[in-house]
Amino acid sequence: MAEQKAIQLSEEEIKPVRELRQVYNNLMFQIGQAELQKHDLMNAVGEVQAAEDKLKVDYEAAKATERQQLEQLNQKYGIGVLNVESGLFAPSGDQPNDTQPATEPVPSPPVKK
């Protein structure tokens, strides 16, 4: 077989190929940027989730402390209702409308898990 000589393409012929190569290079760069942004966002999401998990633990600890405090009040004063705002405790049977039962924690919003 005869050896073929290299052919020099004209600028008109090579220009679209070079432009397409530049398009690919730009797209690869943008894909890399998107991957880095995704990486940063995933790290941020992990940090937010860790903070949320800690807050949920703290919330449960606060509920346990509240139950313990209410139990101590029940042991000291008996079953009744407590108005947290005024500090008034009313034994069972004498419950003003604006009080919370000392046997139950103050209602709190549900926590999503």
Image (cartoon, rainbow, N blue to C red):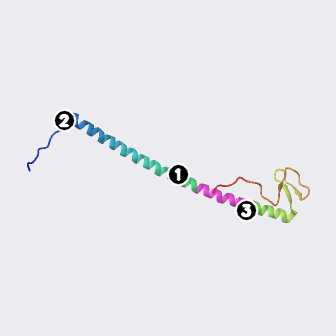
Q: Which residues are magenta?
A: 50-64
Label 3 near label 1: C-beta < 8 Å? no
Reading the chain from its start, which is encountered first: label 1 or label 2?
2
Label 2 near label 3: C-beta < 8 Å? no
Gap between marks 1 and 2, in whole Å? 51 Å
For the stretch drawn in magenta, what is the main secondary structure?
Answer: helix
Reading the chain from its start, which is encountered first: label 1 or label 3?
1
Gap between marks 1 and 3, in whole Å? 30 Å
Query: Going by the picture, which residue comes out furthest to the left?
Result: 2
Determine which residue is flagged by label 3: 64
Q: Is residue 20 left or right of residue 58?
A: left
What kind of residue is marked 1?
Ala
Query: Going by the picture, which residue comes out furthest to the right?
Result: 94
Q: Nearer the viewer, residue 87 or 63?
A: 63
**Residue 49, how many percent across, how many down?**
57, 55
**Residue 46, how many percent across, how many down?**
54, 55
Determine which residue is flagged by label 2: 10
